[in-house]
Amino acid sequence: MKLKRAGDSQYDVELISRDGSALRARVGDLEVAARFIPDSGAGVLAGTLIINGRRFAISGARRKDSIIVGVGPASFEFKPAESGARRHALGLAAPEITAPMPGKVLKVMVQDGDAVEAGQPLVVIEAMKMETTLSAESAAIVKRVRVAVGEMVDHGAVLIDLSPPPASSNSGSAPRGL
């Protein structure tokens, strides 16, 4: 996922890889390795980001077309760097489906290997007697379903891993940054 800071073309951020709590990102021309430790029980995406031994308290929230990130007293708004068609051509909008809050898995509507389309419902969780349906943000292949019906999950838990869909025959180049 590649993002640009809203109103500022100087800063762009690209998530290169994520393996558990370990992250690799590119900020402008600089590649950064970090660890993210989520706060358990937080109602929003919140936690500690560790970069070169320094700890930063961060929080984040998704809006319709942007991501708001707070670091200490500062906040930043990021938007997708490419248009929807370009982003789709390069791969996934989100490589994982995560629990937005602690809850219970009510339904899993896909299996490993299934092809899914943008907007397709994947899993339903229940929290505080309300059901939340989580859907694919872009076309993808279900790489791995990590949860089962009836399972309790924590906020931020990875429910489903996704991989990019097969490249179409009229695509002119390989995806960058993968």
Image: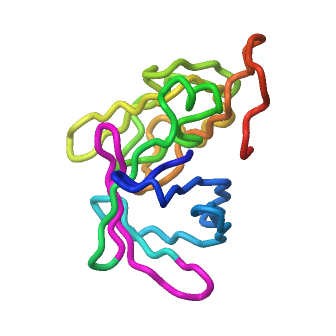
- Please tell me whether residue 168 belongs to the stretch shown in magenta: no
Q: Residue furthest left?
A: 129
Percent across and percent down for residue 42 are 31, 65
Main secondary structure type of the part rendered in magenta: strand
At horizontal 74% and vertical 18% (from top left) the residue drawn is 171
Looking at the rendering, in which quadrant would you find the N terminus?
top right
Please, is residue 69 above or below residue 151 in the view?
below
Magenta stretch bounds:
50-71
Q: Quadrant of residue 169?
A: top right
Question: Is 138 situated left or right of 17 in this image?
Answer: left
Please, is residue 18 above or below residue 122 in the view?
below
Question: Is 89 situated left or right of 133 in this image?
Answer: right
Percent across and percent down for residue 17 are 67, 54
Percent across and percent down for residue 117 are 53, 18
* Foreground pick, 26 / 165: 26
At horizontal 50% and vertical 71% (from top left) the residue drawn is 37
Percent across and percent down for residue 53 are 59, 88
Question: Is 92 situated left or right of 37 in this image?
Answer: right
At horizontal 73% and vertical 34% (from top left) the residue drawn is 175
